[in-house]
Amino acid sequence: MEITAAITKKKGGEFVLEKVELDEPRSNEVLVKVVATGMCHTDMAVRDQQMPTPLPVVLGHEGAGIVEAVGEDVTKVKPGDRVVMSFGSCGHCPNCQKGFPAYCYYILPLNFGGSRLDGSHSLHQNGKALSSNFFSQSSFGTYALATERNVVKVPNDVPLEILGPLGCGIQTGAGAVMNNLNPDAGSSIAIFGTGAVGLSAIMAANVVGCTTIIAVDINQERLEFSKQCGATHTINSKDQDLGKTLAQIMENGVEFAFDTTGNIQVIVSALESLASKGVCGIVGVTPPDKFVQLDPNLLVGKGLTLRGITEGDSIPDIFIPRLIALYQQGKFPFDKLIKVYPFDQINQAVEDSEKGVTVKPVIKIGDQ
Ligand code: CXF
Ligand code: ZN
């Protein structure tokens, strides 16, 4: 079928809205009429070719919409169901079977390969294949082809316009706290970086009952906003001495630290902020030529743990409905992070997100 999609044609280039041809769903696939799609830093990382997905490509990996058609083997959803599209996973490898789809052995080809696993492309333009199936969706388009595994059924009484980011950025932050770090009620956590992932982590830290939630950033406006998301303390590491200020709040360090920046110096600071036996989670994308220099004695002597976390260790079918329920109860107000842009303003959304004006842009594509 003919659809309109935002194509990224060259490295660092703008999105261009053009007509393209989308395949009919195969037996395990789900055709979704896209209502809205969030924009995540990973879309920009691919645009800038820090990730291996070939160009030209149709990006978008935080889609939400309505099921239009399903392949003959699909039983999870039916036409008319409302869904969020999350990351792709194979379902068969040991980690998928153990309940860790974010560590699927095929996570890179399934999400960044630019095609289905068999090498076929779901999108073409003028008879030529486009890089497609990005995160098993390529949802910067009026329709997207997902798979039964990466669609999550969502309730009818929540606006689809806000739900897409639960499929990646928001579950990355909230899940790192709620599924992986799992801080006990009354404990302390420092969160480095107050973008969509960091602010979702702050909200989640509140949900689980952390009583000291320290937001660290260099953007004062974001730090002020982080208080509205549940931060109990803020540190502007540009103007304040991080170590000293942290020690004034928690004399012996925090029990949990969480880095969302991918900045190697910030990762070291996050580790250094920990009390003995502390756990530090990291989720940011670090440029390929950057390496963290660690003092192993610090880890050994204080019994510290450093953990890489992908997609908040989420099982999307379980975790996304939980986040929606928390939102409906007023305990997880992630809609505060979102600003909606019409499809033809997609480049403005990129600009605003890169300037730090908008925390989480969502592109409105169709009606719900
Ligand atoms: C990615 C990072 C690399 C593994 C899959 C998820 N981030 C999404 O935005
Ligand atoms: Zn993402």
Image: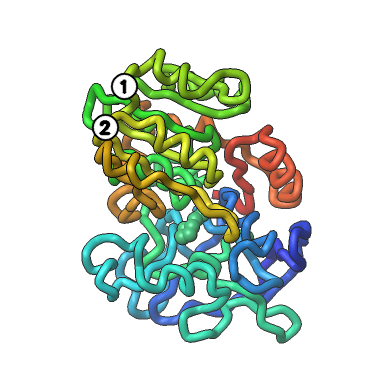
Toward which corner of the image does residue 224 lie, by quadrant?
top right
Classed neighbour count for the residue bearing mark 1: other residues with Cα under 10 Å, few (<14), some (14–19), many (≥20): few
Q: Quadrant of residue 352?
A: top right
- Residue 293 shown left or right of residue 126 in the figure: left
Q: Percent position (x, y) of residue 331? A: 35, 27
Give the left or right position of residue 156, taking residue 186 as reference: right
Looking at the image, tell me whether mark 1 or mark 2 is earlier in sequence order.
1
User: At label 2, which amino acid type do we have?
Assistant: Ser
Mark 2: secondary structure: strand
Q: Nearer the viewer, residue 8 or 6?
A: 8
Q: Quadrant of residue 322?
A: top left
Task: Give the distance between the C-alpha atoms of the residues marked 1 and 2, in whole angstroms.
Answer: 8 Å
Amino acid on which the number 1 mark rests in the picture: Asn
Residue pointed to by mark 1? 252
In the image: residue 177, left or right of residue 173: left
Q: Residues within 10 Å of mark 2 (few under 14, many from 20)?
A: some
Look at the picture and state if 339 lies above or below 233.
below
Q: Which residue is mark 2?
A: 276
Nearest the viewer among 291 and 114 is 291
Q: Residue at x 48, y 47 (%)?
A: 169
Q: Position of residue 340 (x, y in %)?
A: 63, 40
The colour scheme is rainbow
User: Can residue 66 be spotted in the picture?
Assistant: no
Taking the spot 74% from the left edge, 64% from the top edge, the residue there is 11
Q: Position of residue 20 (x, y in %)?
A: 70, 73
Image location (x, y in percent) of residue 17? 75, 61
Q: Secondary structure at mark 1?
A: loop
- Given residues 107 and 130, the one toward you in this image is 107
Report whether the residue tagged 1 is closer than 8 Å to ligand 1.
no
Q: Name the residue rendered at 46%, 18% in the picture.
A: 244
Residue visible at 55% across and 36% down? 195
Marks 1 and 2 in Cβ contact (< 8 Å): yes
